[in-house]
C-alpha cells in the first residue's frame, strides 16, 4: 500500500496537508496555507523535492528529540516531521518520506 497526501482545513481555517505512509501514519506535516491552491502547490513541491536527500535538514529539538524538515529548492520549509526517539528512527522517517513523497494520491477533505 502506497502513501498519500491528506488535504484538510485546520482549526485556524487555513489549509494544511499531511503525507501519510501506506500504513496511515503521518510522516510529514505542512505549514498553514491561506488558500487551497497554495496547499496544492506545497504538495507538488513535496512530490518534486522529497526524493533528494539534499532537501532534508536533520535537526534536534530543545528537548533533544530528533526531527527533520523538508525544504524546497528556495530553502523554504515545505513540511516538518514528528519528534522521534532516536536519530535512527528519524532517518527511517526520512526514507519513508522519500518512498511515499512522490505519491499522486490526494485525499481532499476540504470538500
Image (spheres, helix red, strand yellow):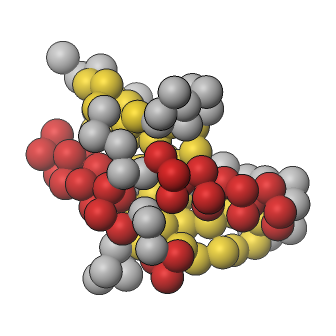
Residue at position x 54%, y 66% in the image: 69
Q: Position of residue 28 (x, y in %)?
A: 52, 49
Residue in the foreground of this view, choosing between 96 and 82: 96
Q: Is residue 59 above or below residue 15?
A: below
Q: Is residue 78 left or right of residue 20?
A: left
Q: How many marks?
A: 0
Q: Position of residue 96 (x, y in %)?
A: 59, 51
Q: Position of residue 53 (x, y in %)?
A: 52, 76
Q: Is residue 94 above or below residue 73?
A: above
Q: Is residue 37 left or right of residue 76?
A: left
Q: Is residue 9 above or below residue 57?
A: above
Q: Position of residue 97 (x, y in %)?
A: 53, 53
Residue at position x 47%, y 46% in the image: 100
Q: Is residue 63 left or right of residue 93?
A: right
Q: Is residue 30 left or right of residue 88?
A: left
Residue in the foreground of this view, choosing between 32 and 96: 96
**Is any part of residue 103 visible from this angle?**
yes
Quadrant location of residue 42? bottom left
Q: Quadrant of the C terminus?
A: top left
**Is any part of residue 33 visible from this angle?**
no
**Residue found farthest to the front:** 1
Residue at position x 47%, y 33% in the image: 2
Residue at position x 61%, y 60% in the image: 94
Amino acid at each position: 500500500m502506497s502513501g498519500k497526501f491528506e488535504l484538510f482545513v485546520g482549526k485556524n481555517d487555513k489549509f494544511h496537508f499531511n503525507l501519510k505512509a501506506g500504513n496511515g501514519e503521518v510522516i510529514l506535516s505542512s505549514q498553514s496555507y491561506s488558500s487551497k491552491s497554495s496547499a496544492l502547490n506545497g504538495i507538488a513541491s513535496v512530490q518534486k523535492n522529497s526524493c533528494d536527500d539534499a532537501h532534508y535538514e536533520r535537526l534536534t529539538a530543545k528537548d533533544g528529540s530528533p526531527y527533520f524538515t523538508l525544504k524546497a529548492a528556495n530553502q523554504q520549509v515545505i513540511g516538518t516531521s514528528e519528534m522521534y526517539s532516536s536519530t535512527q528512527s528519524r532517518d527511517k522517517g526520512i526514507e519513508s518520506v522519500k518512498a511515499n513523497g512522490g505519491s499522486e494520491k490526494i485525499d481532499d477533505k476540504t470538500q
